[in-house]
Image: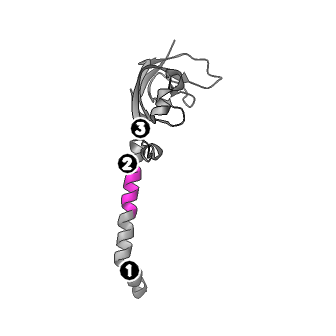
Amino acid sequence: MIAFLQNLILKDFWLKLFSFALATLVWIIVNIAIKKDISPGSTLSLTPTEQVVLRDLPILVVSAAEDARAFTVTPRSAVVTLQGEPANLKNLRKQDVRVTVDLSDTGSIQDARKRVEVSTPAGVSRVKVDPEEVQVSQKN
């Protein structure tokens, strides 16, 4: 039994150690990319990209169809930085980008902070949104 365990650990030890280190490195990189919300498709493009900043985009509230409550969002607008190929950004209009706050999964809201979501057309990716969260309150 002891010989089996020694063989399991010590046979090809350096190969196992290298594999473990490589797997740990990949896990760390993926974890950082998820936390920073980095899209791998936008960074692997071989064509040159540009950035554009859209200001004063209204923040829309999305709620369930049966929910008749009214909500206020503070602040009411956002600044969104987008990245894409120059041809895609040239034809981009403010109406093509939607900034929303999803309240369809929440029950009662007194004063809550919710994450702002940005929907962009194909070929355009979100780089930054300011603010990232908004204060949502229910109107009385």
Residue type for callout 3: Thr
Q: State the image quarter where residue 2 is shown.
A: bottom left
Where residue 119 appears, as percent x and y from the top left, is 52, 31
Q: Mark 3 or mark 2: which comes first in sequence? A: 2
Where residue 56 appears, as percent x and y from the top left, is 42, 18
Residue 84's place in the image compared with 90, above or below, is below
Residue type for callout 1: Asp
* Element class at badge 1: loop
Q: State the image quarter where residue 22 is shown.
A: bottom left
Label the magenta part by its dominant secondary structure.
helix
Q: Nearer the viewer, mark 3 or mark 2?
A: 3
Where residue 73 appears, as percent x and y from the top left, is 46, 19
Query: Which residue sits at x=40%, y=58%?
Result: 26
Residue range (magenta) = 23-31
Where residue 108 appears, as percent x and y from the top left, is 53, 25
Residue holding disc 1 = 12
* Element class at badge 3: loop
* Residue nearer the viewer, 113 or 118: 118
Q: Nearer the viewer, mark 1 or mark 3?
A: 3
Query: Which residue sits at x=40%, y=84%?
Result: 7
